Image (cartoon, helix red, strand yellow):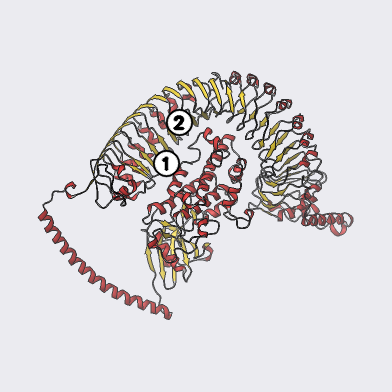
Amino acid sequence: MSKQPLLPSSRQITSVLLLFVFSFACIFFRPVFCSSLSVEVRALLDFKKQLKDPLNYLDSWKITESPCQFYGVSCDNQTGRVVEISLNYKSLSGKISPALGALESLKSLVIPSNYINGELPAALVNCNDLRVLNVTANNITGVLPDLSNLQKLEILDVSDNYFTGDFPTWVGSMTELSALSLNDNNFEEGGIPENIGNLKNLRLLNLGGIQLTGVIPKSIFDLKELETLDLSSNKISGDFPVEITKLRNLRKIELFGNQITGVIPREFAELNLLQEFDVSMNQMHGELPTEIGNMKNLTVFQCFMNHFSGKLPPGFGDMQHLKGFSIYRNNFTGKFPVNFAKLAPLVNIDISENKFSGEFPKLLCGSGKLEKLLALGNDFSGEFPVDYAECKSLVRLRVNQNQLSGKIPAGVWGLPSLDLVDLSDNNFSGEISASVGFSTSLTQLLLYNNDFSGTLPPEIGKLTRLEKLDLSNNKFSGPIPSEIKDVKQLSYLHLETNFFSGSIPAELGQCENLIDLNLAWNFLTGKIPDSLAHISSLNALNLSRNLLTGVIPDNLNRLRFSSIDFSANRLSGRVPSDLLNMAGDDAFAGNKALCVDENSNSNSAKPRPNFGLDICDDKRQPREINKSKLLMFCMILFGLIVLLGGLMYASYKNYKIHREKLDAKNRLDDEKGSGNPKWKLENFHQIEFDADELCDLDEENLIGVGGTGKVYRVESKKSGLTVAVKQIWKGNKVQVMTAEIGILGKIRHRNILKLYASLIKGGSNFLVFEHMVNGNLYEALGRVGKNLVWVQRYKIAFGAAKGIAYLHHDCTPAIIHRDIKSSNILLDKDFEPKIADFGVARVADQELLGSDSNCFVGTHGYIAPELAYTLKVTEKSDVYSFGVVLLELVTGRRAIEEEYGEGKDIVYWVLSNLNDHENILKLVDTRLICGGETEEVADKNDDIMQVLKIGLLCTTKLPNLRPSMREVVKMLADAEPNALRSIADDNREKFGKVFFS
């Protein structure tokens, strides 16, 4: 049943009638009304009134006789009437006023890419002369009103909004339309109406992502003028229509992400004007017709994730305009066309996961513009062509999982734009060239499972952006270069199963972002460097199967590993008890000189397994001191300690008595209101402050008000710092101050807000923190005109995760924050995040919790669901809250919004939009996905999808299914933007095929 046209609301009717009455009066009673505002000025001022204009573009819209000088407004030169409104990309929000219906001469209303919400007013049908209506990329909701009376309309673009209801079949009567874009809305599921075939002037038809079902109606193939046909990301079924060949003017066909079957017919090649073709992610099969090679105007050809087979038509090699070619995950066989891209300006090619064989194609970078070369998972053999040594434009190179052999040309190692190199799982040999130092943009170098040999060149230290280095299972030898210390971004280093020798460089401890370190199965000697304990982020450490000697450093105890292995070395001495309890005996097996303390059983409920670890005794310790001399020395030392202790105790008692008297006097003075008590200043960092200067607060410097007090910005002349001073309100809020001092005064982490000092005098209490110039994350996400780009959002997510992981895993006992939310994540000048507000934080050990530890705390929208039936807060409650923050970063939305519905939150909203894969990208903040080249946008969207997945894992309903924060940090490390996945990996997950299926 079709919906009735949406009738104007009473408010809309009233606005239009008033304007009509005014216009009528102005005509017939000019002496009375001519001095007042024109109808058009009033209409535009009403439009402005209902908008929010944070960048003040509409400042020129003021009371005047003519609107022709208004910004973004154009008038007819003869009549002076408004004919165009153009306000694209102006950060406007609010609603579209129905008063615009009074602009009878309006021909063009163009307001795309803003944040306009509410419904599209039906009063626009009164603009009888309207030719262009473009409201794309806004937040408009409701049913699309019947605009069929606008019979002069040529362009209708309402795409990328939130329109609901049935497909607007009335568009079939708007025969003057040349462009119709309804894509990316929330229309009800249904078929394409036959009457679309009435739009004989249509040149662009975009109906992508609106839940269309059924087959493509034959009437569409009567649109002879059509140049762009986009029906992508729907549920369209049936065989690929041979009738499409009737549309000889087609330049672009987008049918990806449907359920289309069948083969590509030979007649398809008759579309000789076609430039872009994409039928990816369907269920098509068969061979590509040879005639496709005659389509000389093709610039983009994509059919990945289907069931195509056979050989590629050789004519592809003669195409002169091809820029993008993606056919991965099919069953293509045979040799790849030798002359492919010889004449074409190829930028991206992905032929992964097919069955191509023979030599690797040489000419893919013939134009010097190739950026992404992905050919993993085939059967290519022979050497990698030397031709690519001159491909300076190359960004991603993935030829892993083939049968390639021989040496990599020296020039390839030093290509300056490379971001990712994956040569793994081949038979390559030779050395890493010293020219690798020129690849300064490299973030991943993956060479595992080959026959590479030689030393690791010291030039590796020049790769300052490198995050992942995997050389495992090769024949590398020589020492690990100390220059590795300069690779500050390194998080994953695997050198296992090689012939590396010499000692582990102490400089490795300077790689502060290292998470996973594996040096097993080599010939490393010497001691385990103490400096490894400086890598606070280190999560996995494997030094097994080497020739290491000496003791296991005690300071490794400070790290919280998920995996360690020191087995099969020549280590000696005691095994640190914390490491033993963490990893068990087998992680130390094969070290005959290692021993364990008798009471350090890693599992007291079971007998210790026998892995050759003896119980430590005095005979195993390297001491041969004469026992009598040792006894005498101990007795003398004990006597001195007793004597010194007695003197100190007497001195302390005198001081305490004097202090109590002084404190009592000060309290008495305070109670009487007499005297001037002194500040009690406690510093937690080596910074000097003037207490009177800090506490002389000016309301003009107020930067925040919270539940426990006000926060002011203060310039400290004595320290030279700008600090944030929190004035604690009186009453039980002082308990919060005590909690913050008790926690922040003891812990140190780059992602935890620094507490510099506390000050107390009488009833006044102050805390002094480092000042965060960029405010908090909640404010930053809502800040208009200063949008956080994805790289910044990722940096904030990763840093905040590391801060919370430090609280949970590196503090003893662990600390539970209990109020993680975007407003408690502060941002410094570089947008480095800092976790703040520890007023309700508690330690995890139950016996250390105070009486209020199990009271209901947290912020609505961030509170884990299990707290509805238990007051016991665990680390997994913080994980849930952090997951909500991740969803805010991805979607740009608040944890609680009216749009979600009563009692609903952002977690519910995200999950409710994951019912089908096509809606997933709609969850992403539109400010993150605008602009850029197609492949670049796809890459970024995939990076964002990774973080969205992590956010959903963190907000899993059952606490035991949520990851730990250390696991969250590792997952976020693997989701670094533009670093860890190929186009092949990316597109497989592009619409949630892996994450949400």
The correct choice, above or below, for 917 with respect to 802 in the image is above
| Any part of residue 757 in sight | yes
Q: How many marks?
A: 2
64 sits to left or right of 405: right
The correct choice, above or below, for 302 with respect to 634 in the image is above
User: Measuring 35% from the left and 27% from the top, which residue is drawn there?
Assistant: 453
> How far from the left and from the top, in percent, is residue 196?
76, 36
> How far from the left and from the top, in percent, is residue 778?
54, 54
> How far from the left and from the top, in percent, is residue 7?
79, 51
548 sits to left or right of 10: left
The correct choice, above or below, for 911 with respect to 870 in the image is above
The correct choice, above or below, for 515 with respect to 287 in the image is below
Task: Indicate which disc residue 249 carries.
Answer: none
Q: Name the residue that disc number 1 marks.
A: 489
In the structure shown, which secondary structural element does the residue marked by tag 2 occupy?
strand
> In what quadrant of the picture does the C terminus appear?
top right
Q: Residues within 10 Å of mark 2 (few under 14, many from 20)?
A: many
Q: Name the residue that disc number 2 marks.
A: 422
In the structure shown, which secondary structural element does the residue marked by tag 1 occupy?
loop
**In which quarter of the view is residue 848 placed?**
bottom left
Most foreground residue, 743 or 303: 303
| Any part of residue 718 in sight | no
218 sits to left or right of 735: right
User: Measuring 40% from the left and 63% from the top, which residue is drawn there?
Assistant: 849
